[in-house]
Image (cartoon, helix red, strand yellow):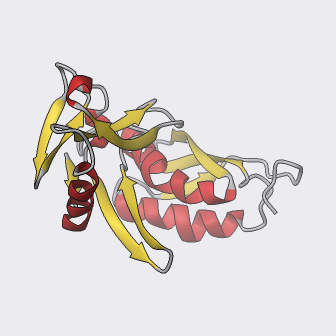
Amino acid sequence: MITITEAAQAHFVKLLADQPEGTNIRVFVISPGTAQAECGVSYCPPDAMEDDDIELEFNGFNAMVDEKSAPFLEDASIDLVNDQLGSQLTLKAPNAKMRKVSADAPLVERIEYVIQAEINPQLASHGGNILLVEVTEEGIAVIQFGGGCNGCSMVDVTLKDGIEKQLLDMFPGELTAVRDATEHQHGSHSYQ
């Protein structure tokens, strides 16, 4: 369910050495399955363990995951990244905002998943997002840009060289094109 690198495991062991005996870590998702989903890691003292917790064993500690967060932490990873500013724990949970869908799920669900898990996080750095409007019988995914993407002069490049290329590569033989349904108008909502 959750991969914790050796460097991150060693970091947790070091942090937990200063905590009361029996303290582990808790990995959780607040508002799982929503656009507002937030992942976190905290200490989990013995009296904070719940009956329905899933207990994952690592070197020198256990990670507790509540039952509600578990499906949204599938494929999650925790790493300790060292850079010029020091070290920092990073938690990546690609399924936090939308539960992972199976490979045989309907095309619309699989495209929605890719949009929420991969495309929208990339667009969010510019305050933008996309929404899947429909998939036509001809295999055309019709999307709508929102937020900072609306009115952005680079929207055509983002669509053709980014979103369309990514979706066509992921769904060969199922998707034929990606089209924009948005009316782009400059305004105070635009990222400039």
- Left or right of residue 55: residue 141: right
Q: Dividing the picture into quarters, in which one does residue 9 lie?
A: bottom left
Q: Dividing the picture into quarters, in which one does residue 125 lie?
A: bottom right
Q: How many marks?
A: 0
Q: Nearer the viewer, residue 130 or 33?
A: 33
Q: Is residue 99 visible?
A: no
Quadrant placement of the C terminus? bottom right
Q: Is residue 17 visible?
A: yes
- Left or right of residue 122: residue 188: right
Residue at the top extreme of this rendering: 51
- In the rendered image, residue 65, in percent from the top left (x then y), is placed at 24, 34
Residue at the bottom extreme of this rendering: 84
Q: Nearer the viewer, residue 42 or 135?
A: 42
Q: Residue at x 18, y 21 (%)?
A: 52
- Left or right of residue 84: residue 99: left
Q: Nearer the viewer, residue 121 or 171?
A: 121
Q: Residue at x 82, y 48 (%)?
A: 189
Q: Residue at x 38, y 65 (%)?
A: 169
35 is higher (above) or lower (below) than 66: below
90 is higher (above) or lower (below) than 107: below
Q: Nearer the viewer, residue 144 or 50?
A: 50
152 is higher (above) or lower (below) than 39: below
Quadrant placement of the N terminus? top left
Residue at the right extreme of this rendering: 187
Q: Dividing the picture into quarters, in which one does residue 108 lie?
A: top left
- In the rendered image, residue 137, in percent from the top left (x then y), is placed at 46, 42
- In the rendered image, residue 156, in percent from the top left (x then y), is placed at 68, 65
